Protein backbone atom coordinates (compact mmCIF):
# COMPACT_ATOMS: atom_id res chain seq x y z
CA UNK A 1 0.00 0.00 0.00
CA UNK A 2 1.46 3.36 -1.04
CA UNK A 3 1.44 6.43 1.15
CA UNK A 4 -0.90 8.13 -1.34
CA UNK A 5 -3.49 5.35 -1.04
CA UNK A 6 -3.12 5.43 2.75
CA UNK A 7 -4.68 8.91 2.68
CA UNK A 8 -7.99 7.22 1.85
CA UNK A 9 -7.70 4.52 4.53
CA UNK A 10 -9.38 5.08 7.90
CA UNK A 11 -8.08 3.30 11.00
CA UNK A 12 -10.13 3.28 14.21
CA UNK A 13 -7.93 2.80 17.27
CA UNK A 14 -9.71 1.94 20.52
CA UNK A 15 -7.66 3.10 23.51
CA UNK A 16 -5.40 5.20 21.32
CA UNK A 17 -4.75 7.91 23.93
CA UNK A 18 -2.89 5.60 26.34
CA UNK A 19 0.77 4.67 26.69
CA UNK A 20 0.97 2.25 23.75
CA UNK A 21 -1.69 4.15 21.83
CA UNK A 22 0.47 7.25 21.50
CA UNK A 23 3.25 5.26 19.88
CA UNK A 24 0.80 3.53 17.55
CA UNK A 25 -0.95 6.74 16.48
CA UNK A 26 2.47 8.21 15.67
CA UNK A 27 3.44 5.15 13.60
CA UNK A 28 0.13 5.21 11.70
CA UNK A 29 0.31 8.97 11.13
CA UNK A 30 3.75 8.61 9.57
CA UNK A 31 2.17 6.17 7.12
CA UNK A 32 -0.38 8.87 6.17
CA UNK A 33 -3.42 6.91 7.40
CA UNK A 34 -6.47 8.78 8.61
CA UNK A 35 -6.89 7.92 12.29
CA UNK A 36 -10.04 7.88 14.39
CA UNK A 37 -9.09 7.54 18.06
CA UNK A 38 -11.95 6.01 20.07
CA UNK A 39 -11.64 6.89 23.76
CA UNK A 40 -13.91 7.48 26.75
CA UNK A 41 -12.75 11.10 27.12
CA UNK A 42 -12.01 12.71 23.71
CA UNK A 43 -11.44 16.03 25.48
CA UNK A 44 -8.34 14.51 27.09
CA UNK A 45 -6.85 13.26 23.80
CA UNK A 46 -5.58 16.60 22.54
CA UNK A 47 -1.97 15.49 23.02
CA UNK A 48 -2.36 13.23 19.97
CA UNK A 49 -3.05 16.04 17.49
CA UNK A 50 0.60 17.14 17.02
CA UNK A 51 1.50 13.56 15.99
CA UNK A 52 -0.10 14.04 12.56
CA UNK A 53 -1.17 16.60 9.98
CA UNK A 54 -4.11 18.94 10.49
CA UNK A 55 -7.30 16.89 10.43
CA UNK A 56 -5.49 13.54 10.18
CA UNK A 57 -6.21 12.45 13.79
CA UNK A 58 -9.77 12.67 15.08
CA UNK A 59 -10.75 11.63 18.64
CA UNK A 60 -14.29 10.31 19.15
CA UNK A 61 -16.18 9.13 22.22
CA UNK A 62 -16.55 5.38 22.72
CA UNK A 63 -16.69 2.94 25.60
CA UNK A 64 -16.07 -0.75 24.85
CA UNK A 65 -18.70 -1.66 27.46
CA UNK A 66 -21.35 0.16 25.38
CA UNK A 67 -22.00 -1.62 22.07
CA UNK A 68 -23.71 1.36 20.41
CA UNK A 69 -20.73 3.66 20.93
CA UNK A 70 -18.37 0.97 19.64
CA UNK A 71 -20.44 0.47 16.48
CA UNK A 72 -20.51 4.21 15.82
CA UNK A 73 -16.72 4.47 16.22
CA UNK A 74 -16.12 1.60 13.77
CA UNK A 75 -18.54 2.82 11.10
CA UNK A 76 -16.66 3.61 7.89
CA UNK A 77 -13.30 2.26 9.12
CA UNK A 78 -11.13 0.01 6.96
CA UNK A 79 -9.13 -1.40 9.88
CA UNK A 80 -9.90 -1.54 13.61
CA UNK A 81 -7.24 -1.82 16.32
CA UNK A 82 -8.22 -2.66 19.89
CA UNK A 83 -5.69 -1.63 22.56
CA UNK A 84 -8.10 -1.40 25.48
CA UNK A 85 -7.05 -3.19 28.66
CA UNK A 86 -6.74 -2.64 32.41
CA UNK A 87 -4.03 -3.72 34.83
CA UNK A 88 -6.29 -3.83 37.90
CA UNK A 89 -10.01 -3.82 38.59
CA UNK A 90 -11.82 -0.82 40.04
CA UNK A 91 -15.56 -0.17 40.26
CA UNK A 92 -17.26 -1.10 36.99
CA UNK A 93 -13.92 -1.61 35.30
CA UNK A 94 -13.67 -5.40 35.52
CA UNK A 95 -11.34 -7.71 33.61
CA UNK A 96 -14.16 -9.71 32.04
CA UNK A 97 -16.18 -6.68 30.93
CA UNK A 98 -13.26 -4.68 29.51
CA UNK A 99 -10.97 -7.39 28.14
CA UNK A 100 -13.62 -10.00 27.40
CA UNK A 101 -16.97 -8.40 26.59
CA UNK A 102 -15.35 -5.19 25.33
CA UNK A 103 -13.04 -7.02 22.92
CA UNK A 104 -16.02 -8.98 21.61
CA UNK A 105 -18.02 -5.81 20.93
CA UNK A 106 -15.15 -4.33 18.94
CA UNK A 107 -14.79 -7.54 16.91
CA UNK A 108 -18.53 -7.78 16.24
CA UNK A 109 -18.59 -4.18 15.03
CA UNK A 110 -15.54 -4.79 12.81
CA UNK A 111 -17.25 -7.84 11.34
CA UNK A 112 -20.52 -5.99 10.75
CA UNK A 113 -18.72 -3.24 8.81
CA UNK A 114 -16.25 -5.50 6.99
CA UNK A 115 -13.19 -3.98 8.64
CA UNK A 116 -9.97 -5.88 9.25
CA UNK A 117 -8.96 -6.14 12.90
CA UNK A 118 -5.82 -6.18 15.02
CA UNK A 119 -6.35 -7.06 18.67
CA UNK A 120 -3.72 -6.49 21.37
CA UNK A 121 -3.72 -9.12 24.11
CA UNK A 122 -0.76 -10.14 26.31
CA UNK A 123 1.76 -12.93 26.70
CA UNK A 124 0.37 -15.15 29.43
CA UNK A 125 -3.24 -15.06 28.18
CA UNK A 126 -4.62 -18.41 29.38
CA UNK A 127 -8.20 -19.47 30.02
CA UNK A 128 -6.97 -21.86 32.74
CA UNK A 129 -4.79 -19.31 34.58
CA UNK A 130 -5.28 -18.54 38.28
CA UNK A 131 -5.11 -14.85 37.28
CA UNK A 132 -8.34 -13.12 36.33
CA UNK A 133 -6.36 -10.78 34.07
CA UNK A 134 -4.86 -13.66 32.09
CA UNK A 135 -8.21 -15.48 31.84
CA UNK A 136 -9.96 -12.34 30.58
CA UNK A 137 -7.24 -11.77 27.98
CA UNK A 138 -7.75 -15.34 26.71
CA UNK A 139 -11.52 -14.82 26.73
CA UNK A 140 -11.07 -11.68 24.65
CA UNK A 141 -8.89 -13.46 22.10
CA UNK A 142 -11.43 -16.26 21.76
CA UNK A 143 -14.31 -13.83 21.27
CA UNK A 144 -12.38 -11.79 18.70
CA UNK A 145 -11.50 -14.82 16.58
CA UNK A 146 -15.07 -16.13 16.80
CA UNK A 147 -16.41 -12.86 15.39
CA UNK A 148 -13.49 -12.08 13.06
CA UNK A 149 -11.48 -15.29 12.33
CA UNK A 150 -8.92 -13.48 10.17
CA UNK A 151 -8.06 -10.99 12.95
CA UNK A 152 -4.41 -10.62 13.92
CA UNK A 153 -3.72 -11.11 17.64
CA UNK A 154 -0.68 -9.39 19.17
CA UNK A 155 0.66 -10.55 22.54
CA UNK A 156 3.40 -8.33 23.98
CA UNK A 157 5.44 -9.03 27.11
CA UNK A 158 5.74 -6.13 29.60
CA UNK A 159 6.15 -2.93 27.60
CA UNK A 160 8.76 -0.29 28.39
CA UNK A 161 9.03 3.31 27.30
CA UNK A 162 9.07 6.82 28.80
CA UNK A 163 5.56 6.54 30.28
CA UNK A 164 5.71 2.87 31.28
CA UNK A 165 4.22 1.53 34.50
CA UNK A 166 7.04 -0.91 35.24
CA UNK A 167 10.50 0.65 35.28
CA UNK A 168 9.13 4.03 36.39
CA UNK A 169 7.26 2.42 39.28
CA UNK A 170 10.24 0.56 40.69
CA UNK A 171 12.62 3.46 40.13
CA UNK A 172 10.24 5.64 42.16
CA UNK A 173 10.11 3.01 44.92
CA UNK A 174 13.92 2.82 44.98
CA UNK A 175 14.03 6.55 45.54
CA UNK A 176 11.77 6.28 48.60
CA UNK A 177 12.45 2.87 50.16
CA UNK A 178 15.59 1.21 51.55
CA UNK A 179 14.72 -2.09 49.83
CA UNK A 180 12.83 -3.49 46.85
CA UNK A 181 10.70 -6.65 47.11
CA UNK A 182 11.40 -9.74 45.03
CA UNK A 183 8.03 -11.49 44.82
CA UNK A 184 8.49 -15.25 44.76
CA UNK A 185 12.24 -14.76 45.11
CA UNK A 186 12.49 -12.76 41.89
CA UNK A 187 12.87 -15.82 39.66
CA UNK A 188 10.01 -15.05 37.22
CA UNK A 189 11.38 -14.39 33.73
CA UNK A 190 10.32 -11.45 31.55
CA UNK A 191 11.15 -10.29 28.04
CA UNK A 192 10.52 -6.51 28.15
CA UNK A 193 9.67 -5.03 24.76
CA UNK A 194 9.91 -1.40 23.64
CA UNK A 195 6.58 0.36 23.04
CA UNK A 196 7.85 1.71 19.73
CA UNK A 197 8.58 -1.83 18.51
CA UNK A 198 5.11 -3.04 19.53
CA UNK A 199 3.54 -0.07 17.77
CA UNK A 200 5.55 -0.78 14.63
CA UNK A 201 4.45 -4.42 14.70
CA UNK A 202 0.79 -3.38 14.97
CA UNK A 203 1.27 -0.83 12.18
CA UNK A 204 2.72 -3.53 9.94
CA UNK A 205 -0.27 -5.71 10.71
CA UNK A 206 -2.47 -2.78 9.68
CA UNK A 207 -0.42 -2.54 6.47
CA UNK A 208 -1.30 -6.19 5.79
CA UNK A 209 2.18 -7.60 6.46
CA UNK A 210 1.01 -10.01 9.21
CA UNK A 211 -0.64 -13.34 8.46
CA UNK A 212 -4.39 -13.28 8.94
CA UNK A 213 -5.76 -15.25 11.88
CA UNK A 214 -2.32 -15.58 13.50
CA UNK A 215 -1.18 -14.76 17.03
CA UNK A 216 2.14 -12.93 17.31
CA UNK A 217 4.15 -12.93 20.55
CA UNK A 218 6.27 -9.83 20.98
CA UNK A 219 9.25 -9.93 23.30
CA UNK A 220 12.32 -7.75 23.49
CA UNK A 221 15.98 -8.49 22.84
CA UNK A 222 16.67 -9.89 26.31
CA UNK A 223 15.11 -12.36 28.75
CA UNK A 224 15.70 -11.30 32.36
CA UNK A 225 14.48 -12.47 35.75
CA UNK A 226 12.55 -10.08 37.96
CA UNK A 227 15.62 -9.84 40.19
CA UNK A 228 17.84 -8.95 37.23
CA UNK A 229 15.37 -6.26 36.19
CA UNK A 230 15.47 -4.74 39.68
CA UNK A 231 19.27 -4.77 39.55
CA UNK A 232 19.07 -3.03 36.18
CA UNK A 233 16.80 -0.34 37.67
CA UNK A 234 19.19 0.25 40.56
CA UNK A 235 22.22 0.40 38.29
CA UNK A 236 20.49 2.81 35.92
CA UNK A 237 19.30 5.12 38.71
CA UNK A 238 22.66 4.84 40.49
CA UNK A 239 21.20 3.70 43.79
CA UNK A 240 22.10 0.98 46.27
CA UNK A 241 19.12 -0.83 47.77
CA UNK A 242 18.54 -4.20 49.39
CA UNK A 243 16.60 -6.76 47.35
CA UNK A 244 14.36 -8.73 49.71
CA UNK A 245 12.85 -12.07 48.55
CA UNK A 246 9.17 -12.36 49.54
CA UNK A 247 7.27 -15.69 49.28
CA UNK A 248 4.20 -15.64 47.04
CA UNK A 249 1.89 -16.30 50.00
CA UNK A 250 3.18 -13.30 51.96
CA UNK A 251 3.17 -11.10 48.85
CA UNK A 252 -0.46 -11.99 48.20
CA UNK A 253 -1.38 -11.16 51.79
CA UNK A 254 0.30 -7.75 51.50
CA UNK A 255 -1.35 -7.18 48.11
CA UNK A 256 -4.75 -7.77 49.68
CA UNK A 257 -4.32 -4.42 51.45
CA UNK A 258 -2.23 -2.61 48.83
CA UNK A 259 -4.85 -3.18 46.14
CA UNK A 260 -7.07 -0.50 47.70
CA UNK A 261 -4.57 2.28 46.97
CA UNK A 262 -5.70 4.76 44.25
CA UNK A 263 -2.99 3.27 42.03
CA UNK A 264 -2.05 -0.08 43.62
CA UNK A 265 1.61 -1.02 43.99
CA UNK A 266 0.52 -4.62 43.49
CA UNK A 267 -2.71 -6.62 43.60
CA UNK A 268 -3.39 -10.27 44.50
CA UNK A 269 -4.10 -10.96 40.83
CA UNK A 270 -0.71 -9.54 39.82
CA UNK A 271 0.94 -11.84 42.36
CA UNK A 272 -0.73 -14.74 40.53
CA UNK A 273 0.66 -13.45 37.24
CA UNK A 274 4.17 -13.43 38.70
CA UNK A 275 4.00 -17.19 39.17
CA UNK A 276 4.36 -17.69 35.41
CA UNK A 277 7.20 -16.62 33.09
CA UNK A 278 6.27 -13.82 30.67
CA UNK A 279 8.38 -14.67 27.62
CA UNK A 280 7.88 -15.57 23.95
CA UNK A 281 7.06 -19.26 23.53
CA UNK A 282 9.31 -21.67 21.64
CA UNK A 283 6.45 -22.34 19.19
CA UNK A 284 6.10 -18.66 18.31
CA UNK A 285 9.84 -18.38 17.74
CA UNK A 286 9.94 -21.46 15.54
CA UNK A 287 7.00 -20.28 13.45
CA UNK A 288 8.25 -16.70 13.07
CA UNK A 289 5.33 -15.18 15.00
CA UNK A 290 7.61 -12.61 16.65
CA UNK A 291 9.05 -9.13 16.09
CA UNK A 292 11.80 -10.64 13.98
CA UNK A 293 9.18 -12.49 11.96
CA UNK A 294 7.67 -9.10 11.10
CA UNK A 295 11.09 -7.76 10.13
CA UNK A 296 11.63 -5.75 13.33
CA UNK A 297 14.88 -5.88 15.27
CA UNK A 298 13.99 -5.62 19.00
CA UNK A 299 15.32 -2.54 20.79
CA UNK A 300 17.40 -3.25 23.89
CA UNK A 301 16.46 -1.90 27.33
CA UNK A 302 19.86 -0.20 27.66
CA UNK A 303 19.11 1.85 24.54
CA UNK A 304 15.90 3.39 25.87
CA UNK A 305 15.39 3.01 29.62
CA UNK A 306 18.30 5.22 30.83
CA UNK A 307 16.91 8.06 28.69
CA UNK A 308 13.95 8.43 31.05
CA UNK A 309 15.08 6.92 34.36
CA UNK A 310 17.81 9.54 34.80
CA UNK A 311 15.25 11.69 36.65
CA UNK A 312 15.26 9.15 39.50
CA UNK A 313 18.98 9.60 40.16
CA UNK A 314 19.94 11.57 43.23
CA UNK A 315 21.31 14.41 41.11
CA UNK A 316 19.15 13.86 38.03
CA UNK A 317 21.06 14.42 34.81
CA UNK A 318 24.07 15.75 36.75
CA UNK A 319 25.90 12.45 37.16
CA UNK A 320 28.36 12.04 40.00
CA UNK A 321 29.33 8.45 39.23
CA UNK A 322 28.54 7.43 42.82
CA UNK A 323 25.57 5.38 43.97
CA UNK A 324 23.19 6.86 46.54
Image (cartoon, rainbow, N blue to C red):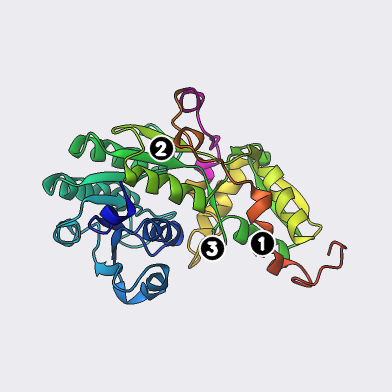
Determine contact: label 2, label 1, CB under 8 Å.
Answer: no
The one of 258 and 106 positioned closer to us in this rendering: 106
Which numbered tag is attached to residue 23?
none
Labels 2, 1: front one: 1
Residue 177 drawn in magenta: no
Where on the picture, by quarter, is residue 121? top left
Q: Which residues are the magenta region?
A: 271-286
- For the question of whether residue 267 can be seen, the reply is no
Q: Position of residue 98 (x, y in %)?
A: 30, 53
Which numbered tag is attached to residue 307?
1
For disc 1, the neighbor class at 10 Å (few under 14, some 14 to 19, many from 20) is few
The one of 295 and 101 positioned closer to us in this rendering: 295
Q: Secondary structure at mark 1?
A: helix
Label 1 vs 3, first from the N-terminus: 3
Disc 3 to disc 2, how far (Cα)?
23 Å
Q: Residue at left 24%, top 39%?
A: 143
Q: How many marks?
A: 3
Determine which residue is flagged by label 2.
Answer: 125
Q: Residue at left 66%, top 37%?
A: 187
For disc 2, the neighbor class at 10 Å (few under 14, some 14 to 19, many from 20) is many
Residue 275 drawn in magenta: yes
Q: Position of residue 72 (x, y in %)?
A: 15, 61
Q: Residue at left 71%, top 65%?
A: 310
Determine which residue is flagged by label 3.
Answer: 163
Labels 1, 3: front one: 1
Amino acid sequence: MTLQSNNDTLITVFGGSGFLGRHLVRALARRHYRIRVAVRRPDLAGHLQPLGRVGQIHPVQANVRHAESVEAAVRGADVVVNLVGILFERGRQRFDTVQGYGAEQVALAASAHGARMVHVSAIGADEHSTSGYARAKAEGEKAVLAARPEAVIVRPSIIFGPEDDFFNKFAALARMLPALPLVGGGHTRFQPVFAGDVAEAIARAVDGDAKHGMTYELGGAEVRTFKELMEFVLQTTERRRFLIPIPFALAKLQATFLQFMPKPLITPDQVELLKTDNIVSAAAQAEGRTLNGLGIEPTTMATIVPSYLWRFRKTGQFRTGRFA
